[in-house]
Image (tube, rainbow, N blue to C red):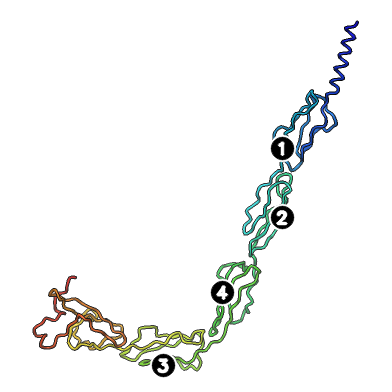
Amino acid sequence: MFPVLFSLCLVGITHVALANKVCPRPPEVPLATINVNKEAYSPGEDIIYQCIPGYIPQSSSRRYICHSSGKWPTVTFRCTPKKCPYPGPLNNGEIHVTDLNYLSIIRFSCNTGFVLEGPTSSQCQADGSWNASLPACQPVICPPPPVSEFGALSYHRIESGEDFFFQETIRFSCLLPLALFGSETATCQADGSWTALPECKSVECPPPEPIEHGFINFGLRGIFHYQNTVHYGCYAPYTMDEASESRCEKTGTWSNKPTCKAPCNIPVGKATVLYNGQKITVKKLKHIQHAETIWYFCKSKTEKCSYKTPTQCIDGQLSVPDCFEEYNWIASLFKTDPADMTPCTN
């Protein structure tokens, strides 16, 4: 009888002891919930942690079992924010990002000369997507320049298209005889306006000045306007080696005033020279025109040969090379003309 009573007492004591070995409420994990939430858990019962929407587990250990000692294992479960992908790039604009975590907000802006079309910001959602799509940065459009359709000032596009976009440039012109003052081009600016437009003004030049040894070809005209031209000519034997045309400029002056250049007399009395590829005596040549060249024959001091030296007529001035020696009529009877000598090889 006593052994039975002892066994019953032992079972009761064990039951009471085990009844006191329960696990308390498990530790709270920030941003997480548990599937079974109560005040006490019997040994062997388990719980499962789960992150709230917008957050994901940092570790894979989610399930924990109440130990027979009445204690929970060390809970290492953690939750971190879900991240959204970078939404860019934003052409002609900028995305301002602090971070890409859940609930973070990014903001959009456009570069100078571009206008934002679409949302100005977007927020990262719980499913890892953005609540607003990427906007577009469209170029600023300028209105047509304030030019009268039938006015003296007109423009033409450098690029094709219907609209005038930011940084697009147009080129202006004036109806003759008006002259254009200011920049020949205007550019569409970031604020939708144009840079300064030019003006068309009337310009008159005084009558062209006459030139010495020459004349001016122009019809009867009392007033000379912008871009009017006159042509100059020279009386023989004078010549002109520059532009013969002069144009009325927007400054009210003529573009140039040419001059008539004098011919050159040959400054020696007896010599054979090379002119236009042929040998000729100076008695026959007599003179050459401005800018023309003749070649003198000079005798070598060390060898029995001759070489050619050029000299050019410059407005009536023609020099004689230092190497040239002019023979008088007596010396010419005994000495060979350098023009008839064998050409030097060097």
**Is 173 located above or below residue 28 in the figure?**
below
Residue nearest the observer in this picture, 69 or 153? 69
Mark toward the start of the polypeptide (3 vs 4) = 4
Which-is-in-front pick, marks 2 and 1?
Answer: 1
Q: Position of residue 240 (x, y in %)?
A: 35, 86
Q: Amino acid at mark 3?
A: Pro
For disc 2, the marked residue is 121
Quadrant of the rendered image containing residue 78: top right
State the separation of the CA atoms marked 3 and 4: 37 Å
State the separation of the CA atoms marked 4 and 1: 63 Å
State the separation of the CA atoms marked 1 and 3: 99 Å
Q: Position of residue 255 (x, y in %)?
A: 45, 84
Q: Seen in the image, is 275 located left or right of residue 213?
A: left
For disc 3, the marked residue is 210
For disc 4, the marked residue is 185
Mark toward the start of the polypeptide (1 vs 3) = 1
Q: Amino acid at mark 2?
A: Ser
Q: Seen in the image, is 35 located left or right of residue 235?
A: right
Q: Residue at x 83, y 23 (%)?
A: 21
Packing grade of label 3 (10 A; few <14, some 14-19, many >=20) is few
Q: Which element carries disc 2, helix, strand or loop? A: strand
Which-is-in-front pick, marks 1 and 3?
Answer: 1
**Is 190 located above or below residue 109 in the figure?**
below
Label pair 4/1, CB-CB below 8 angstroms? no
Q: Seen in the image, is 189 located left or right of residue 331?
A: right
State the separation of the CA atoms marked 4 and 2: 38 Å
Mark toward the start of the polypeptide (4 vs 2) = 2
For disc 1, the marked residue is 57
Q: Which element carries disc 3, helix, strand or loop? A: loop
Q: Seen in the image, is 208 located left or right of residue 189?
A: left
Mark toward the start of the polypeptide (2 vs 1) = 1
